[in-house]
Amino acid sequence: MKYRTLKMSVVAVSCSLVFSVSAESTLFTNVNVFDGKKDELLKNYQVLVVDNKISKVSSEAISVQDATVIDGKGMTLMPGLIEGHGHLQMNGTSLPDIENNRNWEELAVRSAARAKSALMSGFTTWRDAGGMGAGLKKTIDSGELVGPRIYPSGAFIGPTGSHADFRNFTTPNETLYPRGSAGGRLGISCTADSIGDIKACARQNYMQGATQIKLMSSGGVASSFDPWQLDAYSLEELQAAVEVANAYGSYAMSHAYSKVSLLRNLEAGVKTLEHAFMFDKDVYRAMKKNDAYMTTNMTAFSPYLGEIEAINSNPASARKAKTAQAAFANYIDNVNKYQPKLGFQVDCVGGVAACEQQTDHSIYLSGKFFGNHYTLISMTSVNGEIVKLAGEVLDPYFEGKLGVVEEGAYADLILVDGNPLQDLTVIGANEKWFDAPKRDGIETMKIIMKDGVIYKNTL
Ligand SMILES: [Zn+2]
């Protein structure tokens, strides 16, 4: 969007730092900083943004020539939020609805609306967990559309009858990809039943701009043909996917519910477990050994889960949701006990209003289950580490860290009126889900900056 040449000299003069900059710069004064990691705010700080990076974080006064000065009035400056597992292009009401009733035009236009809504809700980075390639990302990066930085996964990779199989019961099983489904033709899913097919799907995704690949290695709830208990891929098949990912310097993320599937994924070298509802001590040990992460959609534990259209519109899904919720009863206690590296995710399938409601409710649930600090680091520094697993070669935003307020990190920042460590409603948390009123942004989120550019300022 804007690459400016930068020359900067720094002179320390007694207690105040004097910067002379020839690039665009913004100085936040009088802010308390949540840095994405610590369980306390840095009180009364100043943060200097030069071009698209954070240049200085200081308790001392920073004096700069030609900077735009923003008096933060004692509010909290924190990293922009990061969605660890979302689906911008999965914006029909359910998987069968996407397969049967939507064409590329509607999905694409709606994904642009979803991207704008995400940024205006404070999400400056988005790991897309499957269902689209790099087209939207490139359009946002070029400045033609407003939205977060995107790490796309391309098409979901899964076998016939898995969580990645979007066909109707009557759709003919043609020989290979795209096997006659709209999901296949649109690059949403890639059906792979052999090691060769898995590698072909993975390579196709990387060719199309994926930064990581997404495997559907166990059954799911929102799909039609797969019991959630299904272990869909063998160890050898998972290893084949990881081998391709590693050849690109990247990694595999894997949708996995059951303990068998979680452990098998870790053994194969998968780096992020998605959902991971049967997380326990053994899974924790294997995660530690493999330096792995997990992300979980908290709405799976919401008392209102049965009201979600992606599930209640499909009788098979509604039945599955009941047994799944019962089987996942130990998840919350186990996470609190072992404290794994947990990334935040919403995993919304739907349009703008539905996904805003689901996001706000997910933040609320995470805070309720795990506390505000664990929730906030999962939405910032932990997800910032997760997206960087894409590796130096494929990472489109390789010049700086994401999810932290640190010198050298990208200037993706939000200024919120209140202390999120004490009150998550300042970033949108809402106890209500479907009953929550439609909103237009988040009132307490006064400034939204991405890549050094301010997209919202209601200060
Ligand atoms: Zn998902």
Image (tube, rainbow, N blue to C red):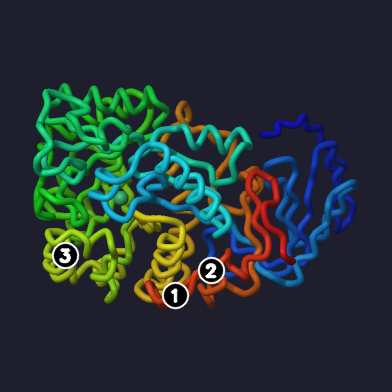
Disc 1 Cβ-to-ligand 1 distance below 8 Å: no
Labelled disc at residue 355:
none
Q: State the CA–CA distance, disc 3 to disc 2.
A: 28 Å
User: Closer to the N terminus: mark 3 or mark 1?
Assistant: 3
Seen at 20% across and 26% down, the residue is 177
Q: Quadrant of residue 338?
A: bottom left
Quadrant (top left/top right/bottom left/bottom right) for the C terminus: bottom right
Percent of width and height locating residue 308:
29, 66
Write down the residue under mark 2: 439
Labelled disc at residue 436:
1
Out of 353 and 217, give the one closest to the viewer.
353
Residue contact at pointers 2 and 1, CB within 8 angstroms: yes
Seen at 10% across and 31% down, the residue is 173
Labelled disc at residue 318:
3
Residue contact at pointers 3 and 1, CB within 8 angstroms: no
Out of 371 and 451, give the one closest to the viewer.
451
Residue 322 against residue 219 in the figure, above or below? below
Percent of width and height locating residue 301:
27, 70
Label 3 SS? helix
Out of 225 and 12, give the one closest to the viewer.
225
Q: State the CA–CA distance, disc 2 to disc 1.
A: 9 Å
Seen at 12% across and 59% down, the residue is 316
Quadrant (top left/top right/bottom left/bottom right) for the N terminus: top right
Q: Amino acid at mark 1?
A: Ala
Percent of width and height locating residue 377:
47, 60
Residue contact at pointers 3 and 2, CB within 8 angstroms: no
Label 2 SS? loop
Seen at 10% across and 32% down, the residue is 172
Out of 62 and 359, give the one closest to the viewer.
359
Q: Amino acid at mark 2?
A: Arg
Q: Amino acid at mark 3?
A: Ala
